[in-house]
């Protein structure tokens, strides 16, 4: 008698799993796909810190991203400086990323990343922060807007 009940429960569980696509953590098909290589430019929209008068006003941007469900990771290249980054696609479809790299006497951080995919184009903003190892120098944060970023592969 208990064996039959166990068989029924296993059968019912199999039906529930099959109805859910076989995986309770599978990718959400409603989320935009950011996977691929994206290239374009960044343009400075704001700057705080002592070195703002010598900060570059714009430069090259390349993203190489992989995606599994809502999880995204890859490399953000800012003027050929690769910065490992990871993040997620939010329920509203926006991509959020953060990352950092040590570069000589400073750490460079990417944060406040918020972009939206529209076809093969990305629009949005992020912040680039330079944190020197010498705290007396002080950090600098550049607000950035994506410009002409398109999917290349």
Image (cartoon, helix red, strand yellow):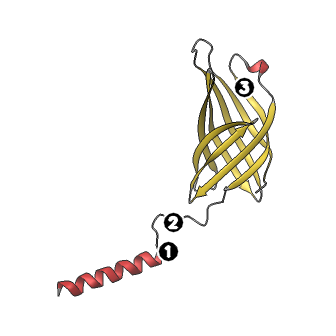
Q: Left or right? Give the position of 10 relative to 27.
A: left
Residue marked by disc 1 = 21
Q: Which mark is residue 83?
A: none
In terms of secondary structure, where does tag 2 sit?
loop
Q: Position of residue 109 (x, y in %)?
A: 62, 32
The residue at which mark 3 appears reads as 47
Residue farthest toward the left in the current orientation of the protein:
1
Task: Kindly identify which residue carries mark 2.
Answer: 26
| Label 1 vs 2, first from the N-terminus | 1
Give how far across and how far down residue 50 sits, in percent. 70, 16
Residue at x 79%, y 54% (from the top left corner): 152
Q: Is tag 1's residue or tag 3's residue first in the polypeptide sequence?
A: 1
Gap in angstroms between the C-alphas marked 2 and 3 = 40 Å
Q: Is 144 situated above or below 91?
A: above
Asked if the residue at tag 2 contacts the one at tag 1, i.e. Cβ–Cβ closer than 8 Å, the answer is yes
Q: How far apart are the two marked residues, 1 and 2, measured between alpha carbons?
A: 8 Å
The foreground one among 22 and 82 is: 82
Residue at x-position 74% and y-position 29%: 46
Name which quarter of the figure residue 14 lies in.
bottom left
Q: Is residue 58 left or right of residue 130?
A: right
**Residue 107 in the image: x percent, y percent?**
60, 27
Q: Secondary structure at mark 3?
A: strand
């Amino acid at each position: 008698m208990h064996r039959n009940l166990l068989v029924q429960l296993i059968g019912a569980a199999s039906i529930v799993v099959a109805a859910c696509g076989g995986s309770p953590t599978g990718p959400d098909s409603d989320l935009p796909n950011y996977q691929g290589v994206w290239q374009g430019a960044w343009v400075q929209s704001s700057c705080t810190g002592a070195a703002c008068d010598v900060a570059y006003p714009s430069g090259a941007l390349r993203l190489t991203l992989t995606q599994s469900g809502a999880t995204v990771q890859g490399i953000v290249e800012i003027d050929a400086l690769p910065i490992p980054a990871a993040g997620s696609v939010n329920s509203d479809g926006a991509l959020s990323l953060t990352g950092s790299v040590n570069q000589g006497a400073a750490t460079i951080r990417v944060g406040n990343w918020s972009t939206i995919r529209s076809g093969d184009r990305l629009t949005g903003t992020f912040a680039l922060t330079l944190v020197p190892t010498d705290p007396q120098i002080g950090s600098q944060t550049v607000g950035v807007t994506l410009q002409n970023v398109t999917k290349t592969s």
